[in-house]
Image (cartoon, rainbow, N blue to C red):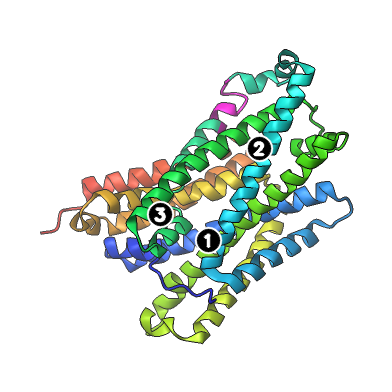
């Protein structure tokens, strides 16, 4: 099955609604950079987790292996297979969550709930601006609420669906699954402090998994956690690679070619070229991982910078959904600026926060990106003259 997929992309849709090829090109480039960076985040998390479980493995080797796995099955299977494997990998994620919740409930009951809750640091039980928890909650709330609106892979699935009612049911199911899974992951993350004491320079999850090895139930939970974590990583990685390959090929490369999309759709060479784009993207992501690791970015920094930068797409997308085409065509230039400056402002805020050691700037970068893009679109509505 070919990787090449000629369904309309989100950026082609935006370009048509705003009557601007430049908007489609800018949105595609920003999305490609963001998705490659997101792929880098997944590889970073997976490699660090694997290195923490198995000592002596070079980080670069684990990154290469994980990238190769994601690239091979994505390039061989293509878009349809990624949709199917995403469902299977989501089952693994729910298995992880269920196993962690069961372990924490049983263990907390054995040692006493009052004692267990008191072991949670006071900083996680109280909201103050100075400890960074408030900015973290605000940033991650905005990021999770809005990121799906400008999500390239989500719109790719919508374009690939044949029935509107399937899209509607799927969207509601996704909202429930995302809200439930994220809430339970937060609860289990905070609950980890009830059972183990944090070790300096060691992820709390690794500390928990080491402590679980002492019991039979803990060993079963470890198996479920590892399965779920790598299911989550491969699910996101393959989705990102497909989206990068699709948008680069259709919105960037194809914009400089004369052949129509329908003329190219039946050619075998198109699948080979698309796989080449996929391979280059995977290799580039490995390079991004190593660069950011040397720079000193943490996984949290990367997550907020990468996913927050995509929020610059949200205001233009909302305009296309709720405004007439006559109105959106007036806003083609502000929309292009909103996407580009939203992307740059998010990364600038995250880089500045990382440089000065202020985590609040990093956590607030998604809000900054959204605010900048929204301000530009509002200014465009007020300042751009109406066309007859």
Residue stretch in magenta: 127-136
Helix, strand or loop: magenta stretch = loop
The residue that appears at 36% across and 66% down in the rendered structure is 12
The residue singled out by tag 2 in the image is 98
Q: Residue furthest top?
A: 114
Q: Nearer the viewer, mark 2 or mark 3?
A: 2
Per the model, the C-alpha gap separating discs 2 and 1 is: 23 Å
The residue singled out by tag 1 in the image is 83
Q: Position of residue 285 (x, y in %)?
A: 64, 62
Left or right placement of residue 212 versus residue 63 in this view:
right
Earlier sequence position, callout 3 versus callout 1: 1
Whether pointer 2 and pointer 3 mark residues with C-beta atoms closer than 8 Å, the reply is no
Look at the numbered disc 2 and give the secondary structure of its residue.
Answer: helix
The residue carrying pointer 3 sits among few (fewer than 14), some (14 to 19) or many (20 or more) residues within 10 Å by Cα, namely many
Q: Position of residue 316 (x, y in %)?
A: 34, 52
The residue that appears at 51% across and 63% down in the rendered structure is 243
């Amino acid at each position: 099955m070919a990787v090449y997929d000629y369904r309309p992309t989100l950026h082609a849709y935006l370009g048509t609604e705003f009557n601007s090829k430049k908007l489609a090109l800018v949105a595609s480039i920003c999305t490609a950079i963001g998705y490659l960076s997101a792929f880098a985040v997944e590889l970073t998390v997976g490699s660090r987790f694997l290195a923490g479980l198995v000592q002596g493995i070079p980080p670069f080797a684990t990154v290469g292996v994980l990238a190769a796995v994601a690239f091979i099955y994505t390039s061989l299977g293509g878009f349809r297979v990624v949709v199917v494997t995403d469902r299977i990998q989501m089952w693994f994620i729910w298995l992880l969550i269920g196993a962690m919740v069961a372990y924490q409930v049983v263990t907390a009951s054995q040692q006493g709930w009052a004692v267990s809750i008191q072991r949670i640091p006071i900083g996680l039980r109280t909201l103050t601006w100075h400890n960074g928890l408030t900015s973290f909650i605000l940033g991650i709330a905005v990021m999770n609420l809005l990121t799906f609106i400008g999500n390239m892979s989500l719109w790719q699935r919508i374009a690939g669906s044949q029935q509107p009612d399937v899209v509607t049911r799927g969207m509601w199911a996704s909202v429930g699954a995302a809200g439930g899974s994220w809430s339970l992951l937060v609860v289990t993350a905070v609950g980890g402090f009830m059972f183990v004491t944090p070790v300096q320079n060691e992820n709390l999850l690794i500390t928990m998994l080491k402590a679980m090895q002492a019991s039979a139930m803990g060993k079963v939970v470890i198996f479920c956690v590892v399965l779920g974590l790598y299911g989550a990583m491969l699910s996101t990685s393959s989705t990102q690679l497909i989206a990068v390959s699709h948008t680069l090929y259709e919105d960037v490369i194809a914009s400089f070619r004369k052949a129509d999309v329908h003329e190219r759709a039946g050619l075998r060479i198109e699948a080979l070229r698309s796989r080449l784009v996929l391979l280059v993207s995977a290799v580039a992501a490995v390079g991004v991982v190593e660069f950011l690791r040397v720079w000193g970015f943490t996984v949290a920094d990367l997550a907020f910078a990468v996913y927050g930068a995509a929020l610059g797409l949200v205001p233009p997308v909302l305009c296309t959904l709720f405004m007439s085409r006559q109105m959106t065509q007036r806003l083609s230039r502000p929309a292009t600026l909103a996407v580009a400056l939203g992307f740059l402002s998010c990364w600038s805020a995250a880089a500045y926060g990382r440089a000065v050691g202020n985590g609040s700037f990093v956590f607030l970068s998604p809000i900054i990106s959204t605010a900048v893009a929204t301000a530009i679109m509002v200014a465009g509505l007020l300042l751009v003259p109406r066309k007859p």
